[in-house]
Amino acid sequence: MENEVVMKIRGLTKKYGDVVGIKDLDLDVYKGEIMGFLGPNGAGKTTTIRTCLGLLQKTSGDVKIFGLDSHEDSIEIRKRTGYLPGDFGMYPDLKVKSILRYLLSQSGVSDESKMKGLAERLELDLSRKYGNLSKGNKQKVGLVQAFMADQDLIIMDEPTSGLDPLMQQKCYELLREEKEKGKTIFMSSHILAEVEEVCDRVAIIRNAELQVVEEIESLKEKMGKKLEIEFENSVDPSIFAMEGVEDFEMDGRKATMIVTSNLDEVIKKISKQNVINMSLETFSLEQLFLTYYSGGGKG
């Protein structure tokens, strides 16, 4: 059975005069997945999100969410979408409980049990005024309001901004739980570790253009593994001159290389030598990211 597409983006372009915010972006986000939207600040992540939600007028292209037009049907879409903007902010003199109750009512929900449960898990004091909260606690308010109406799609722009490491982990738990319930999550981030930890797929954007869309594990496999070997004696580097071995370097008796295929053959070559030490590691998302941003990406 073909995966249901919740967000379908085709040829999306947004220009600010002569400045291009996003260019010809094509992307599908499937029901029940956590899609990470990765890129440095200024790459076009926030522009993409705001344009998809109809908060910015697109220059060209087409966006369908739940099969509805992102601009013509924006009100209907927002009824089914939880949204955490990157610049979330509220009236400073209002109490957190009043803010969340109002926002919950705007979603047509009267049951406050999920709101209160989320606040308890995130250690958020609902009785305090918003303006008296720290940056991290203000972000917790944003998280609660994004999840509390139990909507089908949750769009988040840098969801863990300002959170301490413990609260970041609690946020990841919430994301996984929502996914288990069949919710779809589209989250932008520049924090590589969190995308690697919680996302099923990742889309990498650079200079307003999409570079790659791939399952994280598959992307790692395509980019290969880093192999480091320390030999007891000097070896002839030419034995590793084979298909699937890239970026080979020899420093004395130590060899490093990237193996993209033929790993079995490489291991056989190594086994004929006296080895003191050897390590094999899959690329981290950070290494992948740097590869794409240094112009070496295959996307």
Image (tube, helix red, strand yellow):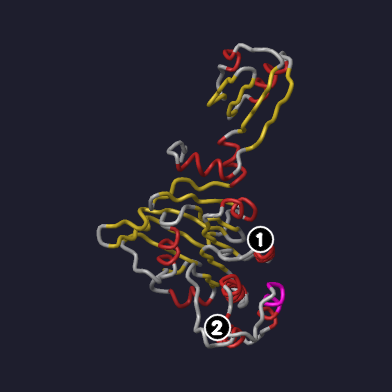
Circle 2 residues within 10 Å: few <14, some 14–19, many ≥20: some
**Residue 120 part of the magenta segment:** yes
From the viewer's perspective, is residue 289 above or below residue 269?
A: below
Q: Measured from the top left, where is residue 49 in percent x and y? A: 45, 64
**Residue 91 part of the magenta segment:** no
From the viewer's perspective, is residue 201 above or below residue 102?
A: above
From the viewer's perspective, is residue 22 above or below residue 271?
A: below
Tell me which label, 1 or 2, sits earlier in the chain: 2
Secondary structure beneath disc 2?
helix
Instruction: Give the labeled residue for mark 2.
Output: 103
> Magenta-highlighted stretch: main secondary structure?
helix
Q: Residue furthest left?
A: 18
Disc on res. 204: none
Circle 1 residues within 10 Å: few <14, some 14–19, many ≥20: few
Disc on res. 165: 1
Nearer to us of marks 1 and 2 is 1
Q: Which residues are magenta?
A: 117-122
Q: Quadrant of residue 272?
A: top right
**Kind of residue indicated by mark 2:** Leu
Q: Measured from the top left, where is residue 254 in percent x and y? A: 64, 21
- Name the quadrant of the N terminus: bottom right
For the residue pair 155 and 39, the one nearer the viewer reads as 39
Secondary structure beneath disc 1?
helix
For the residue pair 207 and 186, the one nearer the viewer reads as 207
- Residue at the spot 44% in from the left edge and 62% down from the top edge: 46
Q: Are marks 1 and 2 in contact (CB under 8 Å)?
A: no
- Residue at the spot 56% in from the left edge and 68% down from the top edge: 153
Q: Quadrant of residue 162?
A: bottom right
